[in-house]
Amino acid sequence: MKICVLVKEVPDAAVTKRIDPSTGRLDRGGEKNLNPYDTHAIEAAMQLKEGGEVQVDEIIAVTMGPGSAVRALHKAVSLGADRSVHLSDDALAGSDVAATGYALAQTLKRESPDLVLLGQQSDDGECYTIGAVVADHLQMPSLTQVIKMDVSDGGLRCERQAEYGYDTVQVELPAVISVGDAINEPRYPSLKAIMGAKKKPLDALGTGDVEIDASRVGTDGSQVECGNFKAPPAKSAGLIIEDEDTNETVEKIVAWLDERKLI
Amino acid sequence: MAGILVYALHYEGAFNKNSLGAVAEAARLASELGTEAHAIVVGEGVSDDLAGQLGGYGAAKVFKVEGPEGLSQPVVDAMAKVMTDNGHDYALFGGGLLGFEIGAGLAARIGAGVTMEVTSVSVDGGKLVAERPILGDSSISESRYKGKGIIIGRLNAFEVPASNGGTAAVETVDVEFSPWSTKAKMVQRGEQRGADVDIEGADVLIAGGRGLGKPEGFDQLQDLAGAFGGNSAVAATRAVVDAGWYPYAAQIGQTGKTVAPKLYLAAGISGAIQHKVGMQSSENIVAINKDSNAPIFEFSDLGIVGDLNKIVPKLIEAVKAKKGS
């Protein structure tokens, strides 16, 4: 079995994010990190490989992004991926969710994976959508927000939480599965793995290498135009208390509640 | 005809509240566009009576498709066919997991633009424009569509009116599902885990998150809710529900319940957007968290930066003392 894990480089969660007024896009400067949800996807792939119920021959980390995204791939490899694929091209800049999913799907076709795993969401705001877009282009069954995944009947038996409780769904392979952070506890990379990450094979590809129709990606190929950014309606800032003397803190909380007749 | 098609999710004979809000919102927008709002229902043995009820919320017509319930890809097949055959330019979804899955897959299938977590939709120049909060709700971005548009609402973004009692015409549509759509099969849907907890009706909600550190942390929150007495209950975030620390029935957020109590006290909750959507309408929000950078402090009325294990026991005693006085 060949597993491709989609990963993404995102701004560090501790960094304040902002829109670059000149481009209307997210300012991707500053500290970057591997999207935390994707580490759960890599761990899920590693657990399938180590679980012994199915033979996993290769785990490949795949990303689309600028040159700096290589660091996210190095991190993915240090967590267990055998090699990585980096799709990077100026023509892709400004791609919306649907265009990004199309470009990633074209890249994945080159690998013919038996399973595509990804984190259910990215820290920088593309909510829950890439997996379903990629699956439709690859013509594979898809399930998102999976919190348990077992090999069963030649496919995967997955659990996820949905609108009315927990669903259990049996999925045939090949498939695209996005996972939630409750699925596992990602391992820490060993020092040796971190040191060796840069030596593992990395394919650097452009749009021409994966048969991407340039008219379907980038700003021009995207079907939605985002802009006209504005501040949300102002809400007065709340009172913040640093707990230094807990007795005093609790007195303040009780007084605050009392004033609002909440107690 | 540039109509709007709404996916109406249903379960055990009733429509999802957010879907009804989306139908009503589509009817409002369609009226401004000079067109009609339609709905689509996909399920096994859905009656014409049930489907027709969507007329009470503004759907002029309901397309009924026989197919599996609770899975996204058969709905993508059905919506793509109905939109193509009937010339709909827009699809609208209430919030929730299936809206994200179906909307995204549908965008890929029909080459549409898609916007998720939408809080407001308007009409400009004969087209729909969607507004979406971004960057942790610190900014609002506007989405305009070059061609077809798919708009997925944030939970509770669209108000749910009472039904006007009207009924919609129901048209049964046969859909040939894609081979890959039939490769995911529902084994069990809507399984409830843990006991029932009534959090929607509570005036005071004490909610716990991963910051509690261990499942036993909820015992302390129960004591705090008990100290408030009256109509108080304990709620939880998705992370701790998924971890098995507390029942699903008490989960707040995107895939849980939406609440608006008089007091929402969040203990050890970071305030991720998925949680925020379920509780942001609370009248008073108090947060206790060790991390001064936790997003929840950005929308709390009172934020306590500190160790809840030190604060909560003393707060229980103080609330008891106050109530006793």
Image (cartoon, helix red, strand yellow):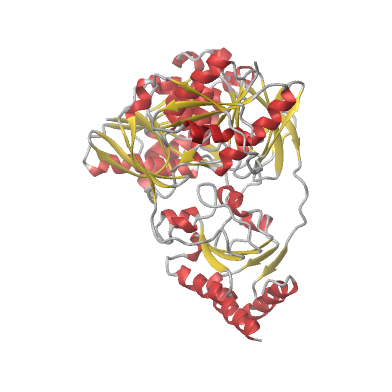
Q: Nearer the viewer, residue A252 or B72?
A: B72
Q: Residue furthest bottom?
A: B325
Rendered location of residue B44, percent (x, y): 39, 33
Compared with A28, B320 (above or below) is: below
On the question of residue A114 being in view, the answer is: yes
Compared with B202, A19 (above or below) is: above
Q: Residue at x 45, y 33 (%)?
A: B47
Res B26 quadrant in image? top right
Rendered location of residue A223, percent (x, y): 62, 21
Q: Nearer the viewer, residue A199 or B221?
A: B221
On the question of residue B117 being in view, the answer is: no
Q: How many marks?
A: 0
Quadrant in the picture for the C terminus of chain B? bottom right
Q: Residue at x 70, y 45 (%)?
A: B138
Res A176 quadrant in image? top left
Rendered location of residue A67, percent (x, y): 54, 29
Q: Is residue A175 left or right of residue A7?
A: left
Compared with B55, B278 (above or below) is: below
Quadrant in the picture for the N terminus of chain B? top right
Q: Residue at x 47, y 69 (%)?
A: B217
Q: Is residue A69 left or right of residue A51?
A: right
Res B72 quadrant in image? top left
Q: Is residue B15 left or right of residue B119?
A: left
Rendered location of residue A22, percent (x, y): 74, 29
Q: Nearer the viewer, residue B28 or B310?
A: B28
Q: Is residue A85 left or right of residue B324?
A: left
